[in-house]
Image: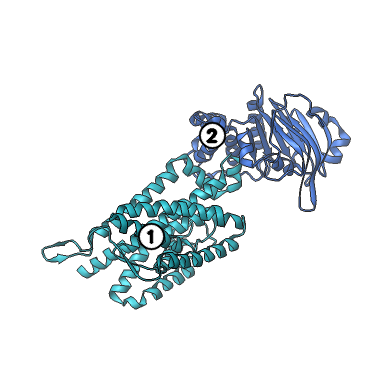
Chain colours: A cyan, B blue
Amino acid sequence: MLQFVNTLLTGLGQGAVYAAFALALVLIWRSTRVVNFAQGAMAAFTTYLALLVVESTGSWWVGLLVALASGLVLGAGVERVVVRRVGPHNELGAVIVTLGLFVALQALASILFGAQFRSFPAPAGLEGFSRGGVTIALTPSMLITVGAVAVVLLGLVALFRFTDVGLRMRASAFDGEVARLLGVPVGRMLTLGWALAALVGSLAGVLIAGGSLVWPAYMDTVIVNGFVAAVLGGLDSPGGAVVGGLAMGVILALVTGYVGSDLVPLAALAVLVAVLLVRPQGLFARTAARRV
Amino acid sequence: MSAPATTAALRVTGLTAGYGPVTALDGVDVTAGPGRITAVLGANGAGKTTLLRTVSGLVPARSGSVHAGDVDLTGAAPERIARAGIAHVPEGRGVITELTVEENLRLGALLGKARGRTDTAIDDVYAMFPPLAERRRRDAHTLSGGERQMLVIGRALACGPDVLLLDEPSLGLAPRVVAQIFELLRERVEGSRLAVLLVEQNARSALSVADIGVVLNLGRVVASAPAAELAADDALRHAYLGF
């Protein structure tokens, strides 16, 4: 029983990170119909910047702030400088461009920060809480991870639901032409959307790195699991991305705990295939058709 | 060509536009005056929709000019033209179905001229179209065709425009609903500063509500006269208006 609870807790902690990453993918998919394959490499890049700051200031929190801020700038820059040039109604072109960015950013990270493994400090302790000789797999670091994801998530919900900018962003995503006819600067809204998505992606990058190792390709498994989480939730649904992320975390933790950690990548693939076979629109999407 | 010093809210001069090798508009002159409904009539492919899309900046003008009052809007981006007081209700409704009724209206009210009084602007729309008030929290995709048309016209009016461009508002609606919407539009325009440019294939009902009629054929203006005169001109009606 204890092992089951601990597996579940570990899964939810990991799942929070997948949720954040999936959310970043969904934000961009919703507004531009592009799966941003560069999201992981962008997050790795901002995590390296955070690591430099953490090593020089000694503060994990300052590092997190730097990662989030540089994520905003990087996301806006990628949209303005690269993605916009591909032009509208050229989703395939945009996807290829994000794949190219992925390769280029990963290579640039190796050049600038080195290709070796480096350890990234944890935000807080990595020891589970224990009482009466029983230790559960709930650590202070995990609480910070889940809390940070929850704060960012609620912030985004509030932004989209209750602010004028959020309404304009949603209108731009749903129907760009009508939004322009209502005076919405759709181009600026897309830039803002990419910036916010990259911020959420950077959050995932730092959280997954905390108490672990970073190297230029360390986000690769998160990209795969986050993408499956986004598909599971329905690529159009931010709420679905969060549920999908948590579900992926738990499923993969159960596979690790009860089947074997070698099978985790296979399990992720199995979930993806199962979703596409049984419910290709995802758990929460409103639209029935999926464009691939 | 020097433009006459009129008080036209919208003045289109020598406008030419098209798609690739096709010239859809060929030197069109149209004006819309405040407190008036100007109907643009003509068969399919006459250039009516292209005229509105060029005025609102969705289609680039090849030559000619578009002025709102004294402001030259030729070649401006659609969002800038919207902010200058030209509200375009596109063909096929343009409801953002994923948003609620109230969010659609708020989007209009947020635009420039209504700033600081968005709630009043929204309440004005509810007063004009009471069915929308009952459905304000619903997603817009639950609305009927007539309610959708009310929503997009209301949303455009919530922008506080000087010029309203309406593209085929009667499309797909029952004649009774069309008459009701046109009547409300007439009431709203009467005695106001609002200029309406109404594009319609349904010439008979458009001329019944409009002050002035402009007939397009193959991208050129072939007639421009008070609505009653056009309706009485049998030869013109048979040749271009189909009734």
Q: Is residue B175 visible?
A: no
Q: Residue at x 34, y 54 (%)?
A: A64
Q: Which residue is mark 2?
A: B109
Could you tell whether B94 is left or right of A222 in the image?
right
Could you tell whether B42 is left or right of A195 in the image?
right
Q: Is the C terminus of chain B in the top left, top right, bottom left or bottom right quadrant? A: top right
Instruction: Name the kind of residue labelled 1 in the image.
Output: Thr
Q: Is the N terminus of chain B in the top left, top right, bottom left or bottom right quadrant? A: top right
Which type of secondary structure does the marked residue at label 2 adopt?
Answer: helix
Where residue B24 appears, as percent x and y from the top left, is 78, 46
Output the chain of dot 2. Answer: B
Instruction: Look at the picture and state if A180 lies above or below A229.
Output: above
Q: Which residue is mark 1?
A: A47
Q: Is residue B132 visible?
A: yes
Q: CA distance from mark 1 to mark 2?
A: 41 Å
Instruction: Look at the picture and state if A101 lies above or below A179.
Output: below
Q: Nearer the viewer, residue A223 or B185?
A: A223
Where residue A202 appears, as percent x and y from the top left, is 40, 57
Which type of secondary structure does the marked residue at label 1 adopt?
Answer: helix
Where residue B153 appears, as percent x and y from the top left, is 61, 36
Q: Nearer the viewer, residue B20 or B239?
A: B20
Q: Residue at x 55, y 52 (%)?
A: A80
Badge 2 density bin: few <14, some 14–19, many ≥20, Cα 10 Å: many
Same chain? Circles 1 and 2 = no
Q: Extreme right residue here? A: B235
Quadrant of res B178: top right
Output the chain of dot 1. Answer: A
Tell me the mark number nearer the camera, choosing from 1 and 2. Answer: 1
